[in-house]
Amino acid sequence: MKKTISIILLIVLTMTLITGCGGGSTKNDDVIKIGINYELTGEVASYGQASVDGIELAIEEINAAGGINGKKIEAVKYDNKSDKSQATTLATKLMTQDKVVAVLGPATSGAFKATIPEAIKNKVVVASGSATSDEVTVDDKGVKEYAFRICFTDSYQGTAMANYALNNMNQTKAVVIMDNSSDYAKGLAANFTKTFEAGGGEVVATEAFVAGDKDFNAILTKIKGQDFGVIFLPGYYEEAGLIIRQAREQGIDTPILGADGFGAPELTELAGADALNNVFFSSHFSSLDKDPSVAGFIENFSKKHGKEPDQFAALGYDLAMFLADGIKRAGSTDTVAIKDALAATKDFKGITGSFSMDENHNPVKAVVVVGIENGVHATSERVAQ
């Protein structure tokens, strides 16, 4: 009997020692796990991959500088394949299985919105650098407590571009050509029209297309005889590039204004450099910015990725830095503390500009208007709403 008890005690002691020396919990305590849930393949892979390129540069720099409060960042990255349901599934996996303290992404408004219920349920922050739809972080029930973004909203940039047309270009007559299948485009068009007309301008025609259309000559022929000085074209580069090319082929040389959906390099491929003249779009970032921190970012990004960063890369970089700043100020990896610290952000200095978080978890920041000539970003200026 004594021998049996001794054996049992020995087994229990051995198991205790093994458990104590296992190292799993120690490893987790030494790192801060952050989720990356982006569109790396599929329809909007251009936005997602650029964003992740920026995020990974930021994480590399943070870790090289000693991490956050002495702990290195460990990124857990998944491709949501530009699919809303996949984005939601991955957000749940990151929060419940991978046990991340926050999730960065997705890039697009629809996919990001789809992950927010999971964030609220699990009390884990989700943050996007490029989800611009107005109702992303707030709805008629109030602010969505665990959702943040560092980009301006569609209404903000629609208003800014209307004011730019009126005040910077002295244009008082506009045509709007919008993607009627996109909430993004419809929101931009509505706010541009409202602000433009409130400022004394007139929208003489509003024409619509749907995503996937290729031939816009009928629309362009219809507006060609109208009296207008500027075209506002809210939408993504896939259709915008073709519209710009076909407009120039028809001899429509008036300025064309767009939003941040123009920011991908594919716009030049689709429109052709010769057609991309007198084109202006609202952006979050310009490589023409003379700020020394911007120059440093461009240099480091180019060394790592072999190309210059676009606005999505800059937003991805700022998004990771914004989260790191919040975790540092929280002094903890407690997800509620991180949420509270992010909500209290004041005067955060990023590559895309300085900003503070407002009560709806939106940044208060300026818009960058980029001018394109001969297919090249030629001018940039920061403008208030």
Image: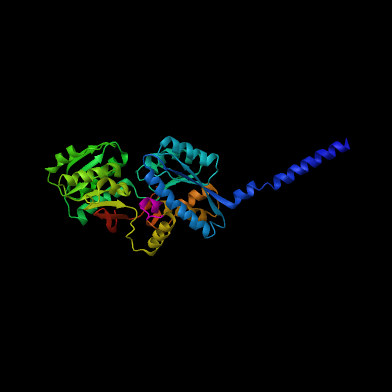
Residue 351 left/right relative to 24: left
Bounds of the magenta segment? 306-315
**Rendered location of residue 277, percent (x, y):** 22, 53
Horizontal side of 317 relative to 186 (left or right) equals right
Residue occupying the far right of the picture: 2
Q: Is residue 164 above or below residue 145?
A: below
Identify which residue is drawn at 19% across, 55% down. 169
Query: Percent from the top left, x then y, of residue 206?
Result: 20, 40
Residue pictured at 41% horizontal, 41% vertical: 41
Picture coordinates of residue 105, whole percent (x, y): 43, 45
Residue 190 visible from this viewpoint: no
Say which of 103 and 275 sits in front.
275
Magenta stretch holds residue 312: yes
In the displayed structure, 213 sits above or below 376; it is: above
Asked if the magenta segment contains residue 305, the reply would be no
Here the colouring is rainbow
The reply to whether residue 23 is visible in this rendering is yes
Q: Which quadrant would the N terminus be assigned to in this image?
A: top right
